[in-house]
């Protein structure tokens, strides 16, 4: 099959592409590379004019300040339109979400209309923020979620990154993509739950992970435990980094002789992985029931990850052993979990090995690619 993947925000489509290619399919990935993360893509629509050049960047800042319009989004749309004539004749087109191109919603709808006319068998992923997800949260259907800090602060902590999906332009874009899609494919439990009542939704297909062949169990006796927190400042409150930072401050005060705490901000993915590979414990995200991509990457390397690991996740995969740590939006809870690991380092090795086995069973990129093929072929 000839397969076109639109959008890349976590390496999901890159890993899926590798599995599909290994199965003998032809795959093209189009996206921005998620800006500073710089994920590989086959056709880049990354804004360069309004991101790096001095005068255009100044003009972009003026537009943002005066009329709240980001010219970088215009450039993304322009670059996609330039390559659009080449994006035709694919057997399958998959969108990472309804805003997969990343330009202004009205413009994106026009671009998608042409894309859909040029191809058949459109599929939409339930992956990331989108109208059904944010609607579900606003209706109060979960114990906590990415909008929790916004509500608890009574709006002082802004949430435009999510609430924009409830506005008319983004809602129209969503329904356009949804109505033209054969099916919707959730990537984990965090998206399965909000999408449960939508009639095109398939079963969860786990995130595909490129599992490193070399693996050495963690041995952390008689040395400091390395804890890594890689912050994406654009998602600071959404990921709950503030809870991690407070817990780490407490840990550093009480156990400075036992821990090596490393914090970074806005690293490209290749640099992020370097820190990830050298740590024992990764602090990933708070407001999740399941794991995001960075958590899975760390688990594949046998690390202990603080992330989403709620009962819904455990029940879905019928887990009997602990494969990670459920990171709750509670500083004392996070601190206590960290302290237990620091004082009992043998648990780090045990949980890390469980994590690696879990990824091998559920997230192998080639096995996951086969599940996508089977789903697409049903239509």
Image (spheres, grey):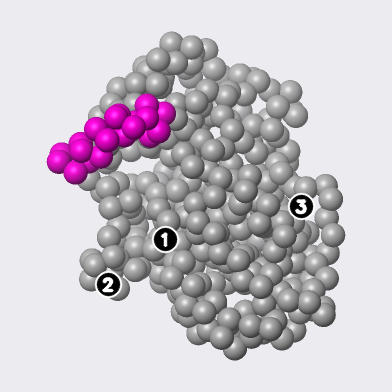
In the rendered structure, are the residues bearing label 2 and label 3 in contact, judged by CB atoms less than 8 Å apart? no
Highlighted magenta segment, given as a residue range: 48-68
Q: Which residue is mark 2?
A: 153
**Which residue lies at the image location 79% right of the left edge and 74% below the top edge?**
220
Query: How far apart are the two marked residues, 2 and 3, measured between alpha carbons?
Result: 40 Å
**Residue 169 appears in the picture as rendered:** no
Query: How far apart are the two marked residues, 1 and 3, measured between alpha carbons?
Result: 30 Å
In the rendered structure, are the residues bearing label 1 and label 3 in contact, judged by CB atoms less than 8 Å apart? no
Q: Which residue is mark 3?
A: 360
Instruction: Report the magenta stretch's main SS.
Output: helix
Please indicate whether residue 28 sits to the left or right of residue 221 in the image: left
Q: Which residue is mark 1?
A: 236
**Residue 222 in the image: above or below residue 366:** below
Residue 53 highlighted magenta (yes or no) = yes
Please indicate whether residue 81 sits to the left or right of residue 278 in the image: left
Please state which of the two labelled residues, at mark 2 or mark 3, is closer to the viewer.
2
Question: Which residue appears farthest toward the left when viewing the image?
Answer: 66
Residue 74 highlighted magenta (yes or no) = no
**Residue 280 appears in the picture as rendered:** yes
Please indicate whether residue 223 sits to the left or right of residue 69 in the image: right
Image quarter (top left, top right, bottom left or bottom right) of the C terminus: top right
**Which residue lies at the image location 25% right of the left edge and 29% below the top edge?**
106
Question: Which residue appears farthest toward the bottom when viewing the image?
Answer: 254
């Amino acid at each position: 099959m000839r397969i076109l993947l639109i959008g890349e925000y976590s390496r999901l489509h890159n890993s899926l592409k590798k599995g599909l290619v290994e199965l003998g399919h032809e795959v093209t990935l189009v996206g921005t590379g998620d800006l500073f993360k710089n994920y590989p893509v086959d056709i880049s629509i990354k804004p360069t004019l309004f991101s790096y050049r001095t005068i255009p960047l100044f003009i972009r800042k003026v537009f943002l300040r005066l009329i709240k319009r980001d010219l970088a989004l215009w450039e993304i749309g322009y670059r996609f339109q330039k390559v659009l004539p080449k994006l035709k004749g694919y057997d399958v087109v998959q969108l990472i979400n309804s805003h997969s191109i990343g330009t202004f919603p009205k413009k994106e709808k026009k671009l998608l209309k042409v894309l859909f006319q040029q191809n058949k068998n459109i599929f939409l992923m339930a992956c990331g923020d989108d109208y059904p997800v944010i609607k579900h949260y606003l209706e109060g259907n979960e114990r906590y979620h990415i909008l929790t800090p916004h509500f608890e602060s009574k709006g002082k902590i802004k949430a435009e990154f999510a609430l924009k999906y409830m506005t008319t332009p983004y809602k129209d874009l969503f329904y356009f993509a949804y109505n033209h899609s054969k099916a919707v494919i959730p990537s984990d439990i965090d998206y399965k739950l909000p999408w449960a009542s939508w009639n095109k939704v398939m079963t969860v297909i786990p995130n595909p992970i490129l599992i490193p062949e070399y693996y050495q169990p963690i041995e952390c006796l008689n040395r400091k435990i390395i804890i890594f927190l890689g912050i994406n400042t654009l998602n600071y409150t959404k990921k709950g980094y503030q809870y991690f930072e407070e817990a780490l401050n407490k840990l550093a005060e009480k156990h400075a002789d036992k821990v090596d705490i490393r914090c970074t901000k806005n690293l490209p993915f290749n640099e992020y992985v370097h820190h990830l590979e050298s740590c024992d414990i990764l602090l990933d995200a708070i407001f999740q029931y399941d794991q995001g991509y960075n958590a899975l990457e760390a688990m594949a390397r046998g690390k202990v990850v603080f992330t989403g690991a709620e009962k819904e996740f455990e029940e879905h995969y019928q887990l009997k052993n602990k494969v990670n740590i459920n990171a709750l939006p509670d500083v004392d809870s996070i601190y206590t979990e960290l302290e237990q690991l620091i004082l009992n380092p043998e648990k780090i090795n045990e949980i890390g090995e469980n994590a690696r086995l879990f990824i091998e069973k559920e997230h192998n990129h080639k096995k996951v690619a086969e599940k996508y093929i089977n789903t697409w072929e049903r239509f």
